[in-house]
Image (tube, rainbow, N blue to C red):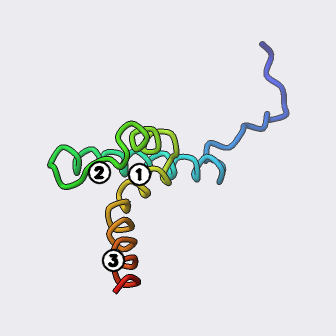
């Protein structure tokens, strides 16, 4: 291959902002799923609605684990509101 006088432009090695965002979201999802699994194994929480909770946990990145982690608190607040409204 003959060398040319023109230097070929190389693509930058730095990731694009989209790649950075996708990486951060992926890492956050993995960390949240691991957190939920650890909480489940330690018996500190249960999956809401069994299989449906598992589907939500795994199917929706970041949002699924957050919903599962906050499920018990939301249910307890709802029960407290309904008991307060009855009283």
Distance from the alpha carbon under mark 1 to that under mark 2: 9 Å
Seen at 50% across and 39% down, the residue is 59
Mark 3 / mark 2, whichever is N-terminal: 2
Name the front one of labels 3 and 2: 3
* Number of numbered markers: 3
Between the C-alphas of marks 3 and 2, the distance is 27 Å
Q: Position of residue 31 (x, y in %)?
A: 36, 49
Q: Nearer the viewer, residue 40 or 13?
A: 40
Residue 81 percent location from the top left of the image: 39, 79
Q: Is residue 61 above or below residue 86?
A: above
SS for dot 2: helix
Local crowd at mark 2 within 10 Å, few (<14), some, or many (≥20)? some
Query: Which residue is farthest top?
Result: 1
Quarter of the image for residue 13 reads top right
Near mark 1 (Cα within 10 A), the count class, few <14, some 14-19 or many ≥20, is many
Q: Are marks 3 and 1 in contact (CB under 8 Å)?
A: no
Instruction: Assign a secondary structure to mark 3.
Output: helix
**Mark 3 surroundings within 10 Å by alpha-carbon count, few (fewer than 14), some (14 through 19), many (20 or more):** few
State the residue in front, 78 or 1. 78
Q: Which residue is mark 1?
A: 65
Residue 34 vs residue 87, the one in the foreground = 87
Q: Residue at x 31, y 45 (%)?
A: 34
- Report the residue marked by disc 2: 35
Residue 22 appears left or right of 33: right
- Which label number is shown at residue 80? 3
Label 1 close to label 2 by CB (< 8 Å): yes
Q: Nearer the viewer, mark 3 or mark 1?
A: 3
Quadrant in which the C terminus is drawn: bottom left
């Amino acid at each position: 291959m003959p060398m040319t006088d023109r230097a070929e432009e190389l693509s930058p090695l730095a990731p694009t902002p989209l790649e950075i965002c996708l990486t951060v979201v992926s890492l956050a999802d993995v960390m949240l799923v691991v957190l939920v699994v650890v909480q489940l194994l330690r018996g500190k929480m249960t999956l809401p609605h069994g299989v449906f909770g598992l589907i939500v946990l795994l199917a929706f990145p970041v949002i699924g684990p957050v919903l599962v982690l906050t499920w018990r608190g939301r249910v307890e607040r709802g029960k407290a509101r309904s008991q307060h409204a009855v009283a």
